[in-house]
Image (cartoon, grey):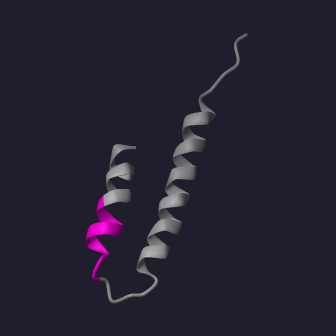
Amino acid sequence: MAITVLAGIAVPYGVLTDSAMTMAVPLFWFLFGIVVIVLIVIGVARWRDDA
């Protein structure tokens, strides 16, 4: 999760700043969103209601 947070800062504002590909940043954010959704699903899948 920490790597995902760091990538969300470093990649679009550092690595892709001077990218020649015009769709690089939107593509990054799309993939970043997918990764975040997967991490949420993994985290929620372990929840149990024992009450």
- Above-or-below relation of 28 to 50: below
Say whether residue 15 is magenta. yes
Q: Quadrant location of residue 41?
A: top right
Q: Residue at x 40, y 44 (%)?
A: 1
Q: Residue at x 70, y 13 (%)?
A: 50
- Furthest toward the top, the residue is 51
Q: Is residue 6 left or right of residue 25?
A: left
- Above-or-below relation of 44 to 19: above
Viewer-closest of 27 and 46: 27
> Which stretch appears magenta?
10-18
Question: How would you classify the magenta stretch by its main secondary structure?
Answer: helix
How many marks are shown on the rendered structure?
Answer: 0
Q: Quadrant of the C terminus?
A: top right
Viewer-closest of 31 and 48: 31
**In x, y percent, where is residue 10?**
29, 61
Q: Residue at x 27, y 72 (%)?
A: 15
Q: Residue at x 38, y 58 (%)?
A: 8
**In x, y percent, where is residue 6?**
32, 52
- Above-or-below relation of 25 to 6: below
Say whether residue 3 is magenta. no
Viewer-closest of 16 and 37: 16
**In x, y percent, where is residue 13?**
31, 67
**In x, y percent, where is residue 22?**
42, 87
Q: Is residue 10 left or right of residue 36?
A: left
Q: Is residue 44 left or right of residue 35?
A: right
